Image (cartoon, rainbow, N blue to C red):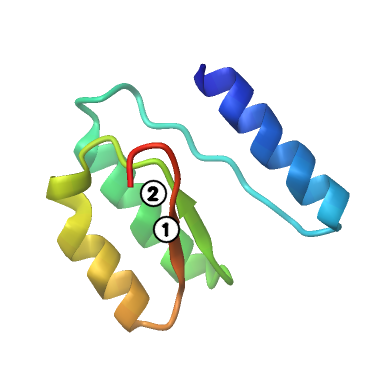
Amino acid sequence: YWLAAAYGTMAEAERLGISAKLGVAQGYTDITGQLNQLDNLVVEGVDAIILSAVGPQAQAQKVDEVVAGGIPVIGMINP
């Protein structure tokens, strides 16, 4: 399931001619890891984030902070 979602996302980015980076959480309990990935993407200055949140409720505050900082966050699969 996740392999197909990742493949489709990366294939569409390539088709559109945009740069994309794939980050992988280490399972549904790795909320801290995914929060760290979000922080790193903000520091890198990405234009947007497509997020399949492993803990949507736990990550809501971080997503709000990222959006308030001017980076759109698009929810995918677990919005």
Which mark, residue 3?
A: none
Q: Position of residue 42 (x, y in %)?
A: 43, 68
Q: Which residue is mark 1?
A: 40
Q: Would you say 8 lies left or right of 46 here?
A: right
Q: Which residue is pictured at 20% across the width and 39% down the height?
A: 55
Q: Which residue is pictured at 33% across the width and 71% down the height?
A: 66
Q: Which residue is pictured at 37% across the width and 56% down the height?
A: 38
Circles 2, 1 touching at the beta carbon (< 8 Å) = yes
Q: Amino acid at mark 2?
A: Gln
Q: CA distance from mark 2 to mark 1?
A: 5 Å
Q: Would you say 18 lies left or right of 74 here?
A: right
Under circle 1, the secondary element is helix
Query: Within 10 Å of the Cα at label 1, are there few (<14), some (14-19), or many (20+) other Cα atoms?
Result: few
Q: Amino acid at mark 1?
A: Asn
Between 12 and 46, the residue placed more toward the observer is 12
Q: Position of residue 21 (x, y in %)?
A: 62, 47
